[in-house]
Image (cartoon, grey):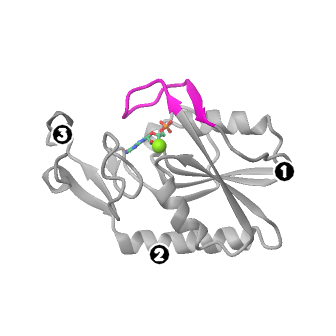
Amino acid sequence: MQDYREFIDEILVDTATLERRIAELGQEISADYQGEDLHLICILRGGVVFLTDLMRQISVPNTVDFMAVSSYGTSRQSTGQVRITYDLQDEIHGRNVMLVEDIVDSGYTIGSVLDLLRTRHPNDLKVCTLLNKPERREVNVPIDYCGFVIPNKFVFGYGLDLDEYYRNLPFIATVNLEKFHPDQA
Ligand code: IMP
Ligand code: MG
């Protein structure tokens, strides 16, 4: 796989800024859920880096579960149809649920997951996304907590992938797609 330095455009959110903002989100969430329990649901795989940092900044009692969905679109663009490939292990009936996502782009993924989870009757269902790309929105989805609003550019790092790689990078960067050559892997 190419070194990311060959195709990086710019660092959009650096490590220190991520840390600061995630600490703020954790404080905000902890204040809003004072006296209650919170069940965090991470959408695999992109949300996992954000989840593990965020949960350590939350002071109310919390539990985690995971789900994976796959969209029928391409790797860089989802479509309206989303299918569950890995379902939750625990019941959410009556619980305070928060979906933790890496990015809301078209909104199809979060929109379908919300529709599905509502049928299981949680007490409360909220969305926390690290990134929001509002210019790309095709369906309206409620976002309760958001780390950063970003421009309409493809990003990678901190959980977000480019053809499954680079999720481990500790910052969020934009890619110059003309310089990225996945076939040379
Ligand atoms: P949506 O269904 O269009 O809102 O897209 C959500 C999913 O698409 C995210 O969970 C990501 O996996 C992926 N995605 C959207 N934009 C980006 C991006 O800029 N970089 C990496 N993945 C992205
Ligand atoms: Mg994803």
Which one is earlier in the sequence, the residue at label 3 or at label 1? 1
Q: Residue shown at 47%/59% (left/top)?
A: 49
**Mark 2: few, some, or many residues within 10 Å (few <14, many ≥20)?**
few
In the picture of the structure, the residue carrying the numbered disc 1 is 123
In the picture of the structure, the residue carrying the numbered disc 3 is 185
| Spatial CA span between label 3 and label 1 | 46 Å
- The image quarter in which residue 109 lies: top right
- The image quarter in which residue 57 lies: bottom right
Q: Is residue 106 magenta?
A: no
Answer above or below: position of 166 versus 115. Answer: below
Tell me: 56 left or right of 13.
Answer: right
Does the image show residue 147?
no
| Spatial CA span between label 2 and label 3 | 34 Å
Location of residue 162 in the rendering, given as x and y in whole percent from the top left corner: 31, 43
**Span colored in magenta:** 70-86
Answer above or below: position of 178 versus 65. Answer: above
| Spatial CA span between label 2 and label 1 | 30 Å
On-image quarter of the N terminus = top left
Give the SS element for disc 3: loop
Give the SS element for disc 2: helix
**Mark 3: few, some, or many residues within 10 Å (few <14, many ≥20)?**
few
In the picture of the structure, the residue carrying the numbered disc 2 is 20
Give the SS element for disc 1: loop
Location of residue 165 in the rendering, given as x and y in whole percent from the top left corner: 31, 47
Location of residue 178 in the rendering, given as x and y in whole percent from the top left corner: 15, 38
Which amino acid, mark 2? Arg
